[in-house]
Image (cartoon, helix red, strand yellow):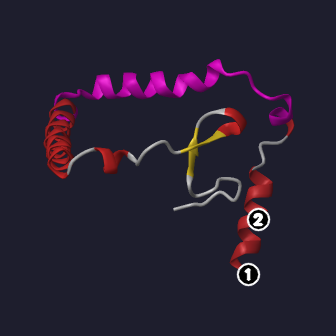
Amino acid sequence: MRRYPSRPADRDIGSSGGWMQKVGGGHNERVDRASQLAWMRQWRRAAVALREQRRLELRALTDRDALAATDALLSLGALLPLDARRLADSGLVRQQALFHRARR
């Protein structure tokens, strides 16, 4: 887990100055153990159902639909304005030089 030096461990994101003191206990201190276990069982069942739904949808997906979905996703990039610096340099040469140095 990453710690941010500007965030005191005993505070939460919130009010003025970007941080606020916790009021009362954390969520786990306010919810009884039985409710926590029931919530976890519910999410585990949902994960199984979602995994099965995903499997069924992928099985039903035709090649034509898969290509159309791929094309739609890839075409989203064309909607974004291209930075003028990218016309002269994509950064690929610099990236490859960094990778080459890292292997030494």
Q: Residue at x 77, y 73 (%)?
A: 101
Residue under label 1: 104
Residue pushed farthest front? 24
Q: Position of residue 65 (x, y in %)?
A: 30, 23
Type of the residue with mark 2: Leu
Figure check: 71 above or below 21: above
**Res. 83 image quadrant:** top right
* Residue at the image position 39 percent from the left and 24 percent from the top: 69
Q: Amino acid at mark 1?
A: Arg
Mark positioned earlier in the residue sequence (1 or 2): 2
Secondary structure mostly seen in the magenta stretch: helix
Q: How many marks?
A: 2
Q: Secondary structure at mark 1?
A: loop
Extreme-top residue of the structure: 79
Please state which of residues 79 and 3 is positioned toward the viewer in this rendering: 3
Question: What SS does tag 2 mark?
Answer: helix
The span shown in magenta is 58-87
Q: Residues within 10 Å of mark 1 (few under 14, many from 20)?
A: few
Residue at image position (73%, 70%) is 100
Q: Is residue 51 above or below residue 81?
A: below
The disc label shown at residue 98, or none: 2
**Residue density around tag 2, few if under 14, some if 14–19, many if 20 or more, within 10 Å:** few
Give me the disc on residue 46.
none
Residue in view at x 86 percent, y 35 percent = 85
In the rendered structure, the answer to whether residue 72 lies left or right of residue 51 reads: right
Q: In the rendered view, does 20 fall on the left or right side of 68?
A: right
Q: Viewer-proximal residue, 104 or 17? A: 17
- Residue 102 in picture, x, y percent from top left: 72, 73
Q: Quadrant of the C terminus?
A: bottom right
Percent from the top left, x then y, of residue 54?
Answer: 21, 35
Q: Is residue 5 left or right of residue 50?
A: right
From the top left corner, tell me how far across and down residue 14 is, in percent.
Answer: 59, 36
